C-alpha cells in the first residue's frame, strides 16, 4: 500500500527524460579523457571538466541575476522551444573532442560554452518539471532517472566497440524532446497558484546559508578527487564503471527506503543523505589501502558524490516549496555552490600537484577532501538541518494533497480549486483577487460556491476542513 501511494503519479516520461539528461552528464564528465592544458610551465589537468564547470557557474549566476532584473527574458530561455536548441548545442559540444582531436584554446572555449551553458539551462528547465508534483513524487523521479541514466552508461561501456559511447553523446536529444513534450502538456493547463512560504524568511535564510556553505565543501572535496584520480592522456576516471555500479546500487537502496510503507519521504531522504556521505567517507578512508585494487577509493568517493548530487536535487526542490520560490531559482543557487566548489577543488588539486613533493600529494589531497566533507557534515549542512527541511517540505505536501482531496470530493471547478489553497492560508479576498488578477466580487462569488460544495458555513469551517483532511492524509 505504501509503495503504491509513494509511486502514484510518477511520470515515466519525466523519468526517461531525466535519465537521458543525467546519462549525458555522466558520460561527458567521467567517460572521456583527462586532457591537459599548459599555461606557461603550469599544466592544468582535467581542463575539459574545469572549463565546463566554469561555463555552468557563469550561466547559473546570470540566471540568478535575470530572476530579479529580467524575468521575462529568463522565462524565454527556459521555455520548451529553447530546450531543443540547447540539445543541438550539447551534441555539437560533446563531439568537439572527437572531431578536433588536439586541444587548442579556441576548441577548449568553444567546447566549454557549448556544453556548460545549455546543460545548466536544461537542468533548470528539468527541475521545474520535476517540482510540479509532491516532494515524494519528485524525489522518486529524480532517483529512478539518475539510476537509469547510470545503468545505461554502464551497459554502453560494456560494448566492445569504442564508437558505442558516441551514442551517449546523443542523449541530450531525447532528453530535450521529452522535456518539451512535458512542458507543452503542462502549459496547456492553467498554472497553479504558488503557496505561501512554510517558514519565516529569516529561518529560510539561515538554512539557505548553511546548506549552500556545506554544498560548496562537498563540491570542493569531489573536485579534489576528480583531478587526483587520473593522469593526463588517460581515461578521465579509469574506475568509473565501478562508480556506476555502486551508484546504481545506491539509487536502489534509496528508493527502497523512499517506497517503504513505514517510512515517509523525509526518512528516505535523510537515509539517502547519510548513506551518500558514508560512501564518500569510506572512499576517503580506504583510498590508500585500495590504491592497487580494482576498485580504488576514488571510485567509491565518486559513487557517493553522485548519490549526494541526486539527494541535493531532491532537497533543493523541497526547499523551493518551503520558501515559495521558483524551483529553477532555488536549484540555480544550490548548483552554483556545488559546481563552484567542484571547480575550485579541481584547481586546488592542480596547484597541489604542481608544488607538493612527489609521493606525498595523493594522500594530502585525500585527507584535505575528506576533512572538507566531514566539516560540512558536522558543522554546516548537518543531518539535523536536512531532517528539519525535509519535515517542513513534507508538511507542505500534506497541505497540497489536502487541497487536491477537497477539490475532488467537493467537485470544485478549476478556478475554485485555484482559490481554495489561498483561502485555506487565510488570505483576504482582496489579496486573492490581486494574485489571480480578478475582481474581489468574483473571488467572493467563488468562495460562496466553495463553501456550498464543501458543505461548510464560512472561512473558518473551511480552514478546519483543510486541517482535518491534512491530518487524515498524514496518518495514512
Image (cartoon, rainbow, N blue to C red):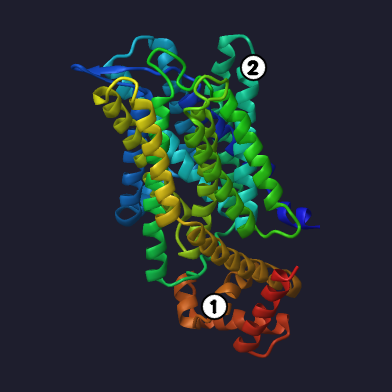
Quadrant for the N terminus, please. Answer: bottom right
Seen at 19% across and 16% down, the residue is 41
Across and down, in percent, residue 36 comes to 33, 17
In front: 201, or 363? 363
Q: Which mark is residue 301?
A: none
Front residue of 427 and 251: 251
Q: Position of residue 180 (x, y in %)?
A: 56, 40
249 left or right of 367? right
Which residue shows up at 54% across the image and 47% down it? 311
User: Eyeballing the image, is 203 above or below 107?
Assistant: below
Choose top left, top right, bottom left or bottom right for residue 132: bottom right
Left or right relative to 95: residue 353: left
Q: Position of residue 211 (x, y in %)?
A: 42, 55
Q: Secondary structure at mark 1?
A: loop
Q: Residue at 50% across / 70% down in the picture? A: 198
Q: Is residue 466 visible?
A: yes
Q: Quadrant of the C terminus?
A: bottom right
Q: Which residue is mark 2?
A: 158
| Location of residue 60 with respect to 149 vertically, above or below | below
- For disc 1, the marked residue is 425
| Nearest-to-viewer mark from 2 and 1 | 2
Please tell me which residue is depicted at 73% across the width and 69% down the height of the picture. 408
Q: CA distance from mark 2 to mark 1?
A: 54 Å
State the count of labels.
Answer: 2
Amino acid at each position: 500500500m505504501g509503495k503504491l501511494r509513494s509511486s502514484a503519479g510518477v511520470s515515466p516520461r519525466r523519468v526517461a527524460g531525466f535519465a537521458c539528461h543525467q546519462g549525458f552528464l555522466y558520460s561527458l564528465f567521467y567517460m572521456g579523457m583527462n586532457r591537459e592544458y599548459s599555461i606557461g610551465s603550469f599544466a592544468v589537468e582535467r581542463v575539459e571538466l574545469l572549463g565546463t564547470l566554469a561555463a555552468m557557474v557563469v550561466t547559473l549566476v546570470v540566471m540568478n541575476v535575470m530572476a530579479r532584473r529580467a524575468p521575462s527574458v529568463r522565462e524565454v530561455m527556459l521555455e520548451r522551444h529553447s530546450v531543443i536548441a540547447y540539445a543541438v548545442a550539447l551534441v555539437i559540444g560533446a563531439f568537439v573532442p572527437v572531431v578536433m582531436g588536439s586541444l587548442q584554446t579556441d576548441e577548449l572555449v568553444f567546447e566549454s560554452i557549448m556544453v556548460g551553458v545549455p546543460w545548466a539551462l536544461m537542468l533548470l528547465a528539468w527541475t521545474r518539471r520535476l517540482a510540479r508534483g509532491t516532494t515524494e513524487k519528485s524525489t522518486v523521479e529524480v532517483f529512478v532517472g539518475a539510476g537509469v541514466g547510470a545503468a545505461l552508461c554502464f551497459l554502453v561501456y560494456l560494448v566492445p566497440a569504442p564508437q558505442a559511447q558516441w551514442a551517449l553523446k546523443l542523449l541530450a536529444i531525447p532528453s530535450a524532446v521529452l522535456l518539451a513534450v512535458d512542458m507543452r502538456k503542462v502549459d496547456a493547463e492553467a498554472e497553479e497558484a504558488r503557496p505561501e512560504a512554510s517558514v519565516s524568511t529569516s529561518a529560510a535564510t539561515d538554512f539557505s546559508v548553511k546548506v549552500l556553505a556545506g554544498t560548496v565543501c562537498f563540491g570542493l572535496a569531489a573536485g579534489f578527487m576528480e583531478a587526483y584520480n587520473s593522469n593526463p592522456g588517460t581515461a578521465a576516471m579509469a574506475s568509473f564503471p565501478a562508480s556506476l555500479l555502486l551508484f546504481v546500487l545506491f539509487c536502489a537502496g534509496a528508493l527502497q527506503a523512499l517506497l517503504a510503507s513505514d517510512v515517509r519521504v523525509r526518512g528516505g531522504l535523510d537515509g539517502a543523505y547519510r548513506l551518500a556521505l558514508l560512501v564518500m567517507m569510506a572512499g576517503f578512508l580506504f583510498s590508500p589501502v585500495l590504491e592497487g585494487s580494482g576498485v580504488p577509493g576514488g571510485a567509491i568517493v565518486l559513487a557517493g558524490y553522485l548519490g549526494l548530487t541526486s539527494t541535493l536535487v531532491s532537497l533543493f526542490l523541497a526547499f523551493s516549496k518551503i520558501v515559495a520560490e521558483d524551483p529553477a531559482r532555488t536549484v540555480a543557487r544550490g548548483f552554483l555552490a556545488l559546481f563552484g566548489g567542484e571547480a575550485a577543488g579541481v584547481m586546488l588539486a592542480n596547484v597541489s600537484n604542481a608544488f607538493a613533493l612527489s609521493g606525498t600529494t595523493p594522500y594530502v589531497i585525500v585527507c584535505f577532501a575528506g576533512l572538507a566533507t566531514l566539516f560540512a557534515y558536522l558543522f554546516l549542512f548537518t543531518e539535523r538541518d536536512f531532517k528539519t527541511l525535509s519535515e517542513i517540505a513534507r508538511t507542505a505536501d500534506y497541505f497540497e494533497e489536502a487541497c487536491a482531496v477537497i477539490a475532488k470530493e467537493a467537485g470544485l471547478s478549476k478556478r475554485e480549486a485555484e482559490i481554495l489553497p489561498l483561502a485555506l492560508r487565510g488570505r483576504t479576498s482582496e489579496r486573492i483577487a490581486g494574485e489571480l488578477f480578478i475582481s474581489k466580487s468574483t473571488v467572493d462569488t467563488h468562495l460562496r460556491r466553495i463553501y456550498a460544495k464543501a458543505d461548510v458555513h464560512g472561512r473558518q469551517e473551511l480552514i478546519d476542513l483543510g486541517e482535518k483532511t491534512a491530518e487524515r492524509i498524514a496518518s495514512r
